[in-house]
Image (cartoon, rainbow, N blue to C red):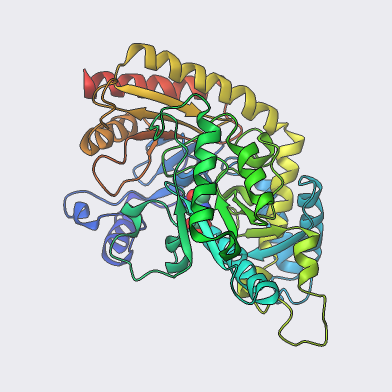
């Protein structure tokens, strides 16, 4: 792979980066002794950095985003063609790619009907929260305004979305928080909070207990990830979702599914919730919508919710008084439309299911070999291996050892992730989310690298 800039240019770029860029999720102190990593080119599953080193990317752009892989010329062409024709007009008007992408997206989401464009997962979630609050005002005198969220789930980086965030290690030092958000217990069976057979139903019943404690007439919505992502790749236990749906119906609570990670193919279906027979009122999505080729996120809802906002046209306060400036950029839906086409044309949902099974089988093989793996969880190309000091006590593996595994894999040319990097003891899940185009060889290379790293780090 030819890196576009010469080594001299690269040292200038590295210096410019070190001097002026504030990286996300990053403790900059380490740059006093090492160079920042600069990614330069990508093709398929592979990336090349500024030193020319090749990496196999097992986390789709670091944060489970580049679902269709790097270097997709057809997406670049779709964006270019659209930008030359019309780059932007506020989304109070429509656009050709916006209409076509919405129609195609809704065709994959039976029961859903309306697409609201935003720039980020955070913002998409905030839109759903605002609608819930507005419905509370319109129909319930403001009372049914509380939004429930679950421990270990994550919904974004703004003050309001961290107020709905179940990972205290990410929220510490950013209070005071937005009021009206109430947590419910997580559903991780490996970290069980109840000693019962029907764990899924018990974990869902815990949500009902919170609703009854708060008062059902004060609770407007429940916001959940279908599979908790950054909180530890937590797949829901059997029976969980059926009961959750039942509880929402019983108390007239809107169900908001955050598909920012699971959406657009990651789990082997278009959306994660479609594995569990859920009928959501809101679905939010971001990362895989255009695989990172353009910044686009969506809040999708039903015609019933949409109708509530057009029932009295004489009242100027009746509609959803909201805008997202860049929700009117046409590059996003143009890229997203082509992204969906690629997933269909290349049968990437089927590939995700097949390769996900291989990844899980390989991880179970590693579990047989390395006692440090306490649990393996996953669905489609979205898998995690939780590392523990001791399988009996389940005490989490240490932060510095998790980082040593990441560094060892990086040395071998494989980029993996670990969840929850903030507090010691909580960041103990290796996280894998390769692009949906992964081959058997890619999957084996990823798990071979982890095998080697575990042997070296844990002996
Ligand atoms: N929801 C989930 C489940 C996420 O994982 C993320 C991002 N990691 C977000 C929401 C927020 O998305 P964004 O960073 O695009 O605001």
Whether residue 218 is visible: yes
Furthest residue in direction left, as rendered: 33
In the image, taking residue 411 as reference, residue 304 lies left or right, namely right
Q: Nearer the viewer, residue 157 or 3?
A: 157
Place of residue 113 in the rendered image (x, y in percent of width and height, measured from the top left)? 79, 57
**Quarter where residue 20 is shown:** bottom left
Place of residue 355 in the rendered image (x, y in percent of width and height, measured from the top left)? 58, 24
What residue sits 73% from the left and 61% below the top? 115
Q: Nearer the viewer, residue 42 or 150?
A: 150
Q: Is residue 24 above or below residue 262?
A: below
What residue sits 44% from the left and 20% below the top? 363
Task: Report how many numbered discs are placed on residues in the image.
Answer: 0
The quarter of the image holding the C terminus is top left
Place of residue 157 in the rendered image (x, y in percent of width and height, measured from the top left)? 44, 61
In the image, taking residue 194 as reference, residue 354 lies left or right, namely right
Q: Nearer the viewer, residue 319 or 323?
A: 319
Q: Is residue 75 above or below residue 409?
A: below
In the image, taking residue 356 as reference, residue 104 lies left or right, namely right
Q: Is residue 251 above or below residue 127?
A: above
Place of residue 422 in the rendered image (x, y in percent of width and height, measured from the top left)? 29, 49
Whether residue 45 is visible: no
What residue sits 50% from the left and 21% below the top? 360
Q: Nearer the viewer, residue 426 or 14?
A: 426
In the image, taking residue 71 as reference, residue 189 lies left or right, namely left
């Amino acid at each position: 792979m030819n890196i576009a800039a010469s080594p001299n240019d690269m040292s200038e770029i590295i210096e410019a980066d070190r001097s002026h860029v504030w990286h996300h999720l990053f403790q900059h102190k380490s740059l006093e002794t090492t160079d920042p990593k600069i990614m330069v080119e990508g093709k398929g599953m592979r990336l090349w950095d500024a030193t020319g080193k090749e990496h196999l990317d097992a986390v789709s752009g670091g944060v489970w985003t580049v679902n269709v892989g790097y270097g997709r010329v057809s997406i670049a062409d779709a964006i270019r063609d659209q930008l030359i024709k019309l780059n932007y007009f506020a989304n109070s008007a429509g656009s050709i790619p916006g209409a076509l992408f919405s129609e195609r997206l809704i065709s994959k989401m039976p029961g859903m009907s309306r697409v609201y464009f935003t720039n980020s997962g955070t913002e998409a979630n905030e839109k759903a929260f605002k609608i819930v609050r507005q419905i509370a005002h319109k129909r319930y005198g403001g009372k049914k305004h509380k939004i429930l969220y679950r421990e270990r789930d994550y919904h974004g980086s703004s003050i309001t979305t961290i107020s709905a965030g179940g990972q205290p290690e990410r929220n510490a030092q950013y209070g005071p928080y937005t009021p009206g958000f109430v947590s419910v217990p997580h559903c991780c069976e490996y970290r069980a909070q109840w000693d019962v057979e029907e764990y899924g139903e018990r974990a869902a019943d815990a949500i009902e207990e919170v609703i009854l404690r708060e008062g059902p007439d004060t609770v407007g919505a429940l916001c959940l990830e279908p599979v908790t992502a950054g909180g530890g790749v937590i797949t829901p236990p059997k029976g969980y979702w059926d009961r959750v749906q039942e509880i929402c119906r019983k108390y007239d609570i809107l169900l908001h599914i955050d598909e920012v990670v699971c959406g657009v193919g990651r789990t082997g279906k278009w959306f994660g919730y479609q594995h569990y027979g859920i009928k959501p009122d809101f679905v939010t999505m971001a990362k895989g919508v255009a695989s990172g080729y353009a910044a686009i996120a969506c809040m999708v809802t039903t015609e019933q919710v949409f109708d509530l906002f057009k029932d009295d046209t004489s009242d100027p306060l009746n509609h959803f008084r909201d805008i997202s400036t860049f929700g009117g950029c046409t590059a996003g839906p143009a890229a997203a439309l082509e992204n969906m086409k690629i997933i269909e044309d290349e049968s990437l949902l089927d590939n995700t299911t097949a390769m996900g099974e291989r990844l899980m089988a390989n991880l179970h093989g590693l579990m047989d070999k390395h006692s440090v793996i306490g649990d393996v969880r996953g669905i489609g190309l979205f898998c995690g291996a939780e590392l523990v000091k001791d399988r009996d006590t389940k005490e989490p593996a240490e932060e510095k050892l998790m980082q040593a595994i990441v560094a060892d894999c990086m040395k071998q040319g494989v980029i993996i992730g670990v969840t929850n990097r903030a507090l010691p003891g909580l960041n103990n899940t290796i996280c894998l989310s390769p692009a949906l185009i992964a081959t058997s060889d890619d999957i084996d290379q990823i798990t071979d690298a982890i095998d080697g790293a575990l042997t070296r780090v844990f002996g």
